[in-house]
Image: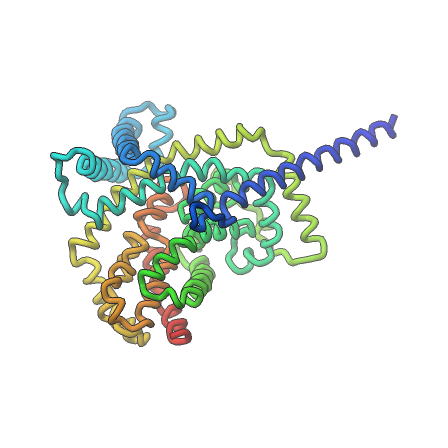
Amino acid sequence: MNEQVGKRAVSLSRRRYLIGLSRFIFFTSIAVLIFFIPIQINGSTEILFGYIYNSLIELFGIAGVWIINLLILVNALLSIAGKFIAREGSRLHSFYQGDSILYVPIYFLGALYSTLYTLHVSVPSFNGPEAIVGPDTGELMSGIALAVMWVIPLGAIFIPFFVNYGSIDLVGKLLQPIMRPLFKVPGKSAVDAITSFLTSSSVAVLFTTRLYKMRYYTKKEAAVITTSFSAVSIGFAAVVIDTAGLMEHFSKVYFSSFLIAFIIAFIMIRIPPLSLKRNEYIDGTAQKEADRESESYTRATLGIAFSSAINQAADANDFFKEIRGSLKEGLVVLPKVMSMLFAIGVSFLILAEYTPTFEFIGAIIAPVMQLLQVPDAAIIAPSLTLGIAEMFLPVLYIAEMVGTLDPGARYFVTVVSMVQIIFFAETGAVMLSTGLPLKLWELVVIFIMRTLIAMPLAAIFMHLLF
C-alpha cells in the first residue's frame, strides 16, 4: 500500500514537472519573440510588439483619435459621479475614491484639449486654438496617445506570458544577488529594464504595475523600479541621438547613458522621496526582513532558479483566465491614462512652446553647467528642463543648432534627456493613472533630482568621450 502511494506521488511529481516545463518553454518563447527578437518586416528591422501596435494605429486612422476622445470624455463625466455622487462601496465610487480631488479638473482639462484637437482634425470648418492643437502641442500629444492606447491593451495581453509562466521567477532568482545589494530591489526588476530597453517605457511601467498588484513588489520597490528603470527604448534612443547629430557616436552615447542611468538609480533609492517609501505590499502587509536579505551565487543557484520557474508555470491559472484578468486591468486604467496624457502633457507642451518658463529655469542652471565646463552652456541650458514635458523636446530644442553647437554640448543634452525618465507626455501620466504608489509632486521632485544628479555625471562622461 505504501509502495503504491509512493509510486503515485512520484508519478504526480513527474507530471507536474513536465506540465511546468512545457508551459515555461512555450510561453517564454512567445514572450521573447514578441518583445525581444528583432525581425525583418518589409525591409526594415522591427520588434514584433512595436510592429503590432504601429499597424493598429495605421489601421484605425482617424477613428483612433475619436476613440481616445470618447474615453477621455466618459472618464471626465464618470469622475464627477464616482467622486461625489455614487454611493460608497459601489464599483464606480471604488474606482475613483483613490484619486485626489484635483484629478477631476485635470480629467476635464484633458477632455477639453482632446475634444478641440479631435474636432480640429475631423471637421474641416473647425479651427482649434493653435496653442492647443498645433504640431508642437496637441498634434504631438495625439501621436503619443495613439501609441499608448494600443501599448496598454497589447502589453496587458502579452505581459502574463512573462509574469505567470516562470520567466520572471527565473530572472529574479538569477539576478537577486546583483539587484538587491546595489538597488535594493528584487532581481526580477531587471526584466523591467530589459522590457523598456527593447520595447517601450510605458510597457515597463505596466509591467511593474502588474507585479506590484500581484504582491511581487512592495510600494517602495515599485516606486524605485518605475522611476529608475523605465528608460527610453533603444529604437527611440537612435532617433534622439540622430536628431542631435551624434549617430556616428551612437555606441558611446547610448551605453554611457545606460551606465549613468544605473548610477542615478543607485543614488536615488538611498535619498528621499524614494527612501521614505514603505516596504509594504499593496494590501498593507509588511515585507519580511528575510525577503530583503542579499543572496550570493552558489552552484545550486541555476537549479533553484529553474525549479522556481517550473513551479510557477505549473501553478498558473488557465491561460485565457490569466489573459482576461490582465486585459481587464489594462482596459480599466486606459481612460485615466488618456486623460492624464492629454491634460498634463499638452499643458507642459504649451508652457514649453508659448511661455518663457523653461528659459527662465534654464538661466538659473546655466551657471552650474558653466562650472562643469559644458560648452555652449547658456545656449543649451533651457533645453534640460523641457524633458519634464516630453523626452524628445530637449533634443528638438537644439536640433536647428546642431551645425554650430559643440559635440560635447549636444552629447550633454542628449544623455541628460535620456536618463530623466519622468516625462508627463507619457511615463509620468501612466505612472499616475495605474495605481502605483507615486504622487504628482513626488514625480516632479524625482525629475528635478534625477536632472541635478545627471548633470555632473554627464559632464564627466562628456569630458572623457569628447
Instruction: Tell me where residue 445 sits by quadrant.
Output: bottom left
Question: From this viewpoint, is residue 449 visible?
Answer: no
Image quarter (top left, top right, bottom left or bottom right) of the N terminus: top right
Instruction: Tell me where residue 97 sits by quadrant.
Output: top left
x then y, percent, for residue 329: 43, 33
Q: Residue furthest front?
A: 43
Image quarter (top left, top right, bottom left or bottom right) of the C terminus: bottom left
Question: From this viewpoint, is residue 442 visible?
Answer: yes
x then y, percent, for residue 181: 55, 59
Q: Total number of numbered labels?
A: 0
**Residue at image location 19% in from the left, 50% down from the top:** 350
Answer with left or right where residue 142 lies relative to residue 35: left
x then y, percent, for residue 128: 14, 40
**Residue at image location 46% in from the left, 61% down from the top:** 262
Who is closer to the viewer here, 46 or 138? 46
x then y, percent, for residue 362: 23, 64
Answer with left or right where residue 387 lies relative to residue 8: left
Please say if 320 is above or below 311: above
